[in-house]
Structure formats: structure tokens, C-alpha cells
Image: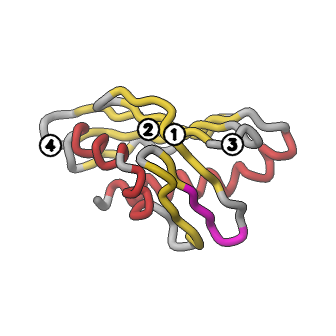
Amino acid sequence: MEIKGAKVLINKNAETVFDFLNQVENFEQLMPESISKFEVLGPNAFIFALKGMPEIALETKSSQRPTQLVLGAKSDKLPFNLTGDLTPIDGATCHIELCFSGDFNPMMAMMIKGPITKFIETLTTNLQSL
């Protein structure tokens, strides 16, 4: 299953956005209002929960400064990645596109598609307002 967010313009250069996203504690600023838990687990990992959803632990899986950052699930129970692709435009702006990809059975995919799509939209919107 793959869910792509909108490709949006950010009024910051790609290096600044990458550095912001590469510090996991900054993800708290991007979370939806319905967040019920956010905790940094280490320099490359955090756990969060949204109201009515189970806790999700993410960790940095790979990065290519300043064009890509990949976060993935710490647990193998729900294997997925959240990738942020950055495209520098000039010294002051960049595009970002978030993509969620995971290997889920059809029933699970149907259940999580709506909430994950909304989550990606919220992260993208909050990134634009940095």
C-alpha cells in the first residue's frame, strides 16, 4: 500500500527543512491536534499516539541530506516507511512530498487508508506553516 501526500512548496531551503526533520523531537510540532502522546526514544526515534489509535514508534531508517529522509516503524508487526522527498527550488524554497508505504493485508489496508491519508495531509500542512 502506498499513499502519497501533496507536493507542496516550503518557504525554506531544502537543507533547513531536512535538518528540522532529521531532529525527531521536531515531529511533535507537526503532529495533528488529536495527539495524545509524544515521546522521544533516542536521537533517531520517537513514539506517538493519536486519540483512538495505537501507539506508533518511528525511527530514522536512512537519509540523504538534503533530498530524502526515511522513517520506519520500529516494530516488525506493522512494517511501513514514511519518506520525505525534498526538491530544492532555489536558495530560499523547496518542494516536499511525503509518501507512506507499507505491506499490509487488504483488510488492514482498508482500515488504515483514511486515517493515514489524513495524517499525511496534516504533516504536510504543518510543514508549510513552519
Q: Secondary structure at mark 3?
A: loop
**Drawn side of residue 120 relative to residue 126, left or right:** right
Q: Which mark is residue 92?
A: 4
Q: Earlier in the sequence, mark 1 or mark 4?
A: 1
Which one is closest to the eye, mark 2 or mark 3?
Answer: 3
Question: Are dots 4 and 2 in contact, CB under 8 Å?
Answer: no
For the residue pair 56 and 90, the one nearer the viewer reads as 56
| Magenta segment, prevailing SS (helix, strand or loop) | strand
Element marked by disc 1: strand
Q: Of the residues tagged 1 and 3, which is closer to the observer?
A: 3
CB atoms of marks 1 and 2 within 8 Å: yes
Name the kind of residue labelled 1 in the image.
Answer: Leu
Image point (62%, 42%), residue name: 73
Q: Position of residue 72 (x, y in %)?
A: 57, 39
The disc label shown at residue 71, or none: 1
Provide residue 125's location: percent of width, then percent of height. 41, 58
Which mark, by number, is residue 84?
Answer: 2
Please rate how many residues cluster around mark 3, counting C-alpha atoms within 10 Å: few if below 14, some from 14 to 19, many from 20.
Answer: few
Which residues make up the magenta segment? 47-52
